[in-house]
Amino acid sequence: MNTSMVRYIIGNILKIEAVFLLLPCVVAIFYKESQGWNYLLVAILSGLLGFLLSLKKPKNNIFYLKEGCITTALSWIILSLVGCIPLYITNEIPNLIDAFFEIVSGFTTTGATILSDVEALSHCSLFWRCFTHWIGGMGVLVFLLAIVPMNGGSHMNLMRAESPGPTVGKLVPKLKITARILYVIYFVLTVVEFILLLIAGTPVFDALCLSIGTAGTGGFAVKNTSVADYSSAVIWIVSIFMFLFGVNFNMYYLILYGKLKKALLMEEVRAYVLIVTASIIGITISILSLYPSLGEALMHAAFQVTSIISTTGFASADYEVWPGFAKSILVILTFIGACAGSTGGGIKISRILIAIKVFIKEITSYIHPKSIKKIQMEGKPLEDDVIRATSVYFLTFILIFVCSFLLVALENKDFTTTFTAIAATLNNVGPGLEMVGPTQNFGHFNWFSKLVMSFDMIAGRLELFPLLLLFTPAIWREHFSTRIAEKKKNKH
Amino acid sequence: MLDFMSSLTSGERNKHGLKIIIVGCGNVGSTLVEQLAPEGHDITIIDTDATVVQSITNMYDIMGVVGNGANYSTQTEAGIESADLIIAVTNSDELNLLCCTIAKQSTNCAAVARVRTPDYNAETSYLRKSLGLTMILNPEYEAAREAARVLYLPTALEINSFAHGQAEMIKFKIPEYNILDGKPIYSLSRELTNNHILICAIERDGEVYIPSGNFMLHTGDIISFVATKKNAIAFLGEIGFDTKQVKNTMIVGGGRASYYLAKQLITMGIDVKIIEQNKSRCEDLSNLLPEAIIINGDGTDSELLKEEGLEFAESFVPLTGKDTENVMLTLYAKQVSDAKVVTKINRSTFKNVIAKLDLGSVVYPEYITSEAIIKYVRAKKDSYNSNIESLYHLFDSRVEAIEFLVEKKSELINVPLMELSLKDNLLIAFINRNGKILIPRGQDTIQIGDTVMIVTTHTGFYDLEDILEK
């Protein structure tokens, strides 16, 4: 394994985090909060460590898929470890594991919180919590690829490990430009939402946190009631943007370059629209009796549906009190998740589509056992590899789900709580039902369950395999045996 | 927003390179990617095989599209509207021509096609003109030409011609007890009467040096020098080499390259014997090449080779489709005979291993092709400045020899060469003034209208001014 390249990239990630950590300091200056010093201290330490790690440029910049996965998984863990320190040392979250859980939930854009009183946090901590969503949404390695000049083409493996979806492609030949285009689209959409929220009369700080929280499809709010207290205009704006950030970013690229027709024909986005519309209609009918007008029922249905399917996790109403049918739809949406190539989590629409197509193919093969049918997606035949990887993804997903479920069930909490807690963290949604419902939090779990769920959140964000690879003994055995071989070679 | 986005991408593009689409990812396609990607071009590849596309996009910073390259929608997906160059190097000549023709319909990009079939080869210039192509490549033909050049002067390991054939760069190895052994380069001009040559690169123990006058020559050094054809032969004769062309050649394998080579050797007056396994191919060859002796048999059979007189052949060229067979045949021929051997290697993967085997002359068809394209690409990227006339990679791409046309005034013009501060590891090999080759001395100057050849271990030169120390 190319350890020096892994070290170099992680060094750069730490430098980037140092720069990001300066932003809460700015907020602290603005609100004259003393907690800002803690952020500054961590920023300096992180920058220093990053500087040391990336001091020596690696000679060999060849990078294979396994290095890509390992680097990505390590980066995310280190990012979270450093990111939780300020919350801990400001004493706003006095328990280190709680702070870690909170910030993992931030970076992975889950939005599951252990805090019962969010409003008690300082502004800079609130901002940092929300800002981690923005960093994690598009991915910190993609950001690194966009700004740091790196030669060699094998860095595609980094993007592949971090970007969601069964197949990860480029928009343009150069990886760097692809990463930049993605970030520009991301940034512009965020700014548009911010401006719209300001126009709708939201306070500047709330508008900022809401828009970066929506952009990463995160879900940390700055109010204890999530977004329920804002005006209906704000709720509508946020739900539209949650929907937009759940769309495959390739579509925005196609629209920008004038290929509107091709953009509108994207199979995945069409399925996404279909699922969202159907769910909104279903839930609206189901909850009509609870709300005074159709408009209000529609608004809450639309907000909850877009919030859950894009895996954001804001809540405009306590859907805990909704009828069982509406809640069931929301739980199903938790698993479906957003489009591949968006900032959302979950299993992803494209995988669901592939699974459905494989299912139909299997059924037909019972009727015509000798028939041959290639599965197509977006008008192109799907490679067998992609189909296999998708099936394996489902199996792995279930496996991790079951294991985590079992481990958290050791606490003897009720079934719905445990089940939806795992579903909400593994799919990066945030809130679940019962004790982890929209008005509740994750604070009541013990440290072990929190660690399990932190693992689930990172696994969910990185689409399982990079993180699993990090814990595969074979990788490390190989790594150490090559290290020993190298040393022997150098001696001679 | 749109303007910003396009400036984001196009700004990058102007600074770094061209938008190139390569159709077909076989040997030549992947060599092109390998050589063009580090020069910063925006490359998109098209291939029907998804696994090939996947593996090459993993290794290089390029985009891959799976599909038929002659399909308009596939080309659109690869961004043909904004492409500067399309290179079609699939296995099929017809498909390559079709790719280029279709691309030419939708945009005004430059188009390069690989066309290998002898039927079309005779009509290359007609095809090129009528289809509006920029270049037609025929790696087998070029490889055969290179092999023929070496057989013309068997002392040489490799011969490249510059300035439309007026100057040649010849590579040879200093044998034992040669008069060059132990002499510094500056002493050559005093000791030899034929001294209108310039030694421009020396390979010793795997390292390549661009020598200065004090460089001591040793036995076993591989030397590249430039001179006119006449001077080169005179020089080689004076230092004790045989400079006659070979009289006969044995070729194993009857593919396209063999045909092209045989045809050229026959016109040079060399007797040709071709060994080919496939009966009907043998019959075709005997129709095409009535002067050649065609043997139907297994060219890897040592008994057959002996029977056909390998031991007494003056030269031997294995041109089978398999690199491994070619290498084994070369090693065998070196063992049993004194024949001059030229080996064709298709895949460059094990180039370093092959270099250590001491096979003598090795021809890489795919490099010949990619050099032609790289030369074109570099010249095009900088079309308003000095033009690159030709470019060769020497010593496994560690040295570049580039011929520049001087078209405009610059700080280099009319300055005696000894007053220019040139980069290290670089020298000016010759100046071609109105068709006359000058081997430059310190007092000579570069004039507008000259073509100048430089030899360097630096890569990525686009302009003659790049040679100055900055």
Image (cartoon, rainbow, N blue to C red):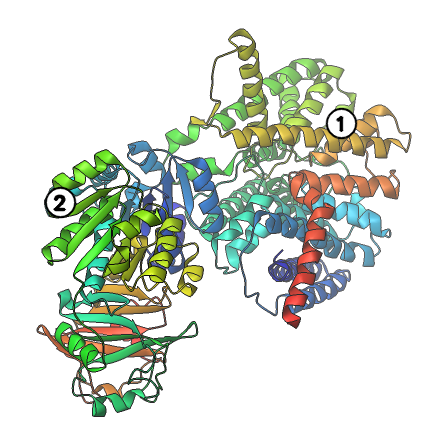
Q: Which mark is residue A318?
A: 1
Q: Which mark is residue B39?
A: none
Q: Nearer the viewer, residue A277 or B292?
A: B292
Is residue A150 found left or right of A90 in the rendered image? left
Q: Position of residue A155 (x, y in %)?
A: 53, 52
User: Is residue B111 visible in the rendered structure shown here?
Assistant: no
Screen quadrant of the C terminus of chain B: bottom left
Q: Position of residue B280 (x, y in %)?
A: 22, 34
Residue visible at 49% across and 12% down in the picture: A370
Mark 1 vs mark 2, foreground winner is 2
- The residue wearing badge 2 is B289
Q: Residues within 10 Å of mark 2 (few under 14, many from 20)?
A: some
Q: Residues within 10 Å of mark 1 (few under 14, many from 20)?
A: some
The three-letter amino acid code for the residue at tag 2 is: Leu
Is residue B12 found left or right of B258 in the rendered image? right
User: Is residue A452 visible in the rendered structure shown here?
Assistant: yes
Q: Nearer the viewer, residue B324 or A285?
A: B324
